[in-house]
């Protein structure tokens, strides 16, 4: 968890639960799933609820923000989806089931804590309970800007009703920014669904990460959007991001007055202007002669850390890792915020 984070577009991260189901191609190489495997947890099964100490951290951030006059951006649920429609089990990292008080979602208990106690007034914790508690927490931290990112914008309206001590209510929350993921043109429809929720939040944003294809008509959907974040994929099975796709998005954002933020290239760095003569120059300072490319690179598969998608385009990719690949596009770091 996130007192600090390497994510360029937020200041902190908060994950009320861990776990999610894949819904689109952008989920294929989910880093959160890879992380879950490392810790031997069932990412697509039980939702793992974080500890009580963890839930108290945003209250401390809020107090500090009020004192310093700052507004930290908190990326909420990088390891799950706040608006996932799921009714399975919620447990802790040891597999203990959780119970939630029928009238106060902040009152929770584990199996061991319920032993010998009267369970009346409690029920098994659900993801709805977690959401209710999260919205209570958001309402209790007005000095933080909460960034809720989802691949399920169709669920926002009906899941937005925050349970509070005075009951359920729909409301505008100025300290919430809602975003949706758009990995290729097949998912542009998510943007229009997101915009239908504009009266609920302070800002609307798009996370185009991983960018898996061109979005030439993105501009037709940008009215009402405050911010666009673009990023390439990281991880062992990551897919390269074409720099022309990024340039197109940058230019469309500029045309429509939308803040543009390039988060990362990911694992693969592009080398452009391949052709005859076969000298490729990279904006990252790497130069090489394409005669040195490994044999078999034109077979549509990465070979020895190199990838040439069709053997004809003017872009060849090299796997160098996201830190070396960096964030610059045509020598410029795009760091805009709304």
Image (cartoon, rainbow, N blue to C red):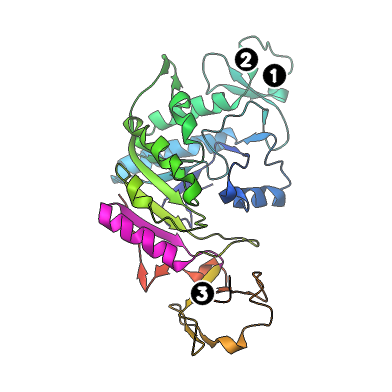
In this rendering, is residue 40 above or below 140? below
| Crowd band around label 3 with a 10 angstrom C-alpha radius: few (<14), some (14–19), many (20+) | few
Q: Quadrant of residue 321?
A: bottom right
- The residue where tag 1 is placed is 114
- The residue where tag 3 is placed is 313
Q: Looking at the image, is mark 2 or mark 3 earlier in the sequence?
A: 2
Query: Callout 1: helix, strand or loop?
Result: helix
Q: CA distance from mark 1 to mark 3?
A: 63 Å
- The residue where tag 2 is placed is 122
Q: Looking at the image, is mark 1 or mark 3 earlier in the sequence?
A: 1
**Magenta residues, start to end:** 242-267
Q: Quadrant of residue 141?
A: top left
Nearer the observer: mark 1 or 3; the answer is: 3
Measured from the top left, where is residue 261 in percent x and y? 37, 57
Q: Is 198 on the left or on the right of 288, as rendered?
A: left
Measured from the top left, where is residue 74 in percent x and y? 43, 44
Q: Is residue 336 visible?
A: no
Q: Are marks 1 and 2 in contact (CB under 8 Å)?
A: yes
Q: Is residue 99 visible?
A: yes
In this rendering, is residue 214 above or below 173? below
Q: Are marks 1 and 3 in contact (CB under 8 Å)?
A: no
Query: Callout 2: helix, strand or loop?
Result: strand
Rendered residue at 37%/32% (across/down): 197
Q: Quadrant of residue 199?
A: top left
Q: CA distance from mark 1 to mark 2?
A: 10 Å
Rendered residue at 54%/40% (across/down): 15
Nearer the observer: mark 1 or 2; the answer is: 2
Measured from the top left, where is residue 7 in percent x and y? 47, 55
Q: 282 and 245: which one is in front?
A: 245
């Amino acid at each position: 968890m996130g007192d600090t984070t390497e994510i360029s577009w937020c200041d902190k991260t908060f994950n009320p639960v861990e776990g999610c189901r894949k819904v689109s191609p952008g989920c294929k190489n989910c880093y959160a799933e890879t992380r879950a495997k490392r810790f031997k947890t069932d990412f697509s099964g039980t939702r793992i609820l974080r500890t009580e100490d963890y839930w108290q951290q945003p209250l401390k951030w809020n107090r500090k923000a009020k004192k310093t006059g700052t507004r930290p951006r908190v990326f909420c649920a990088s390891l799950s989806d706040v608006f996932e429609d799921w009714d399975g089990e919620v447990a802790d990292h040891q597999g203990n089931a959780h119970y939630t008080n029928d009238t106060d979602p902040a009152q929770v208990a584990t199996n061991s804590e319920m032993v010998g106690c009267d369970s009346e007034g409690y029920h098994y914790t659900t993801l709805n309970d977690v959401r209710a508690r999260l919205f209570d927490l958001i309402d209790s931290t007005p000095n933080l800007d909460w960034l809720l990112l989802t691949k399920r914008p169709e669920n926002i309206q009906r899941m937005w009703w925050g349970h509070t001590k005075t009951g359920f209510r729909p409301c505008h929350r100025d300290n919430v920014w809602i975003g949706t993921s758009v990995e290729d043109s097949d998912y542009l429809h998510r943007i229009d669904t997101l915009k239908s929720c504009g009266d609920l939040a302070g800002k609307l944003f798009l996370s185009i990460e991983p960018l898996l294809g061109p979005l030439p008509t993105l501009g037709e959907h940008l009215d009402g959007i405050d911010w666009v974040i673009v990023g390439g994929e990281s991880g062992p099975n990551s897919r390269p991001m074409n720099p022309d796709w990024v340039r197109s998005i940058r230019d469309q954002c500029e045309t429509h007055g939308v803040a543009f933020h390039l988060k990362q290239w990911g694992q693969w760095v592009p080398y452009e202007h391949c052709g005859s003569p076969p000298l490729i120059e990279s904006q990252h300072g790497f130069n090489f002669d394409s005669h040195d490319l490994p044999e078999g690179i034109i077979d549509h598969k990465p070979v020895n850390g190199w990838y040439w998608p069709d053997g004809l385009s003017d872009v060849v990719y090299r796997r160098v890792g996201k830190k070396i690949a960096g964030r610059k596009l045509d020598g410029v770091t795009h760091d805009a915020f709304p």
